[in-house]
Image (tube, grey):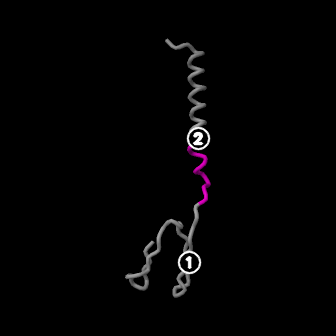
Amino acid sequence: MISSTSKLVLAIVGLTILALVIAIVILPTVGAKTNFATYQNKDFHFKIQYPAKWTKEETSLHSHQIKL
């Protein structure tokens, strides 16, 4: 049988590991800045922002289509 002191130590170790995982893995991704590019259509008077890693393709599409 595990003593209450051993249970307490295991609980503290478990919480410490959880805190480290949150600090190292989860927190750096919260609020991470994403670079955006802007697409503007002057014919229809609108613009949108999309992730800069996406590629924009306007060739071989109908005039009202955009492929991101």
Quarter containing the C terminus: bottom left
**Disc 1 to disc 2, C-alpha distance:** 37 Å
Q: Which residue is mark 1?
A: 47
Residue 8 is marked as: none
Residue 6 screen position, x and y as percent: 57, 16
Disc 2, SS: helix
Q: Which quarter of the picture shows residue 7? A: top right
- Secondary structure mostly seen in the magenta stretch: helix
In the foreground, 16 or 11: 16
Q: Is residue 17 magenta?
A: no
Residue visible at 60% across and 36% down in the picture:
19
Relative horizontal placement of residue 60, taking residue 48 as reference (left or right): left
Residue 1 screen position, x and y as percent: 49, 11
Instruction: For the residues labelled 1 and 2, say whether their Cβ atoms are less than 8 Å apart.
Output: no
* Amino acid type at image mark 1: Lys
The magenta segment is 22-33
Residue visible at 42% across and 80% down in the picture:
65
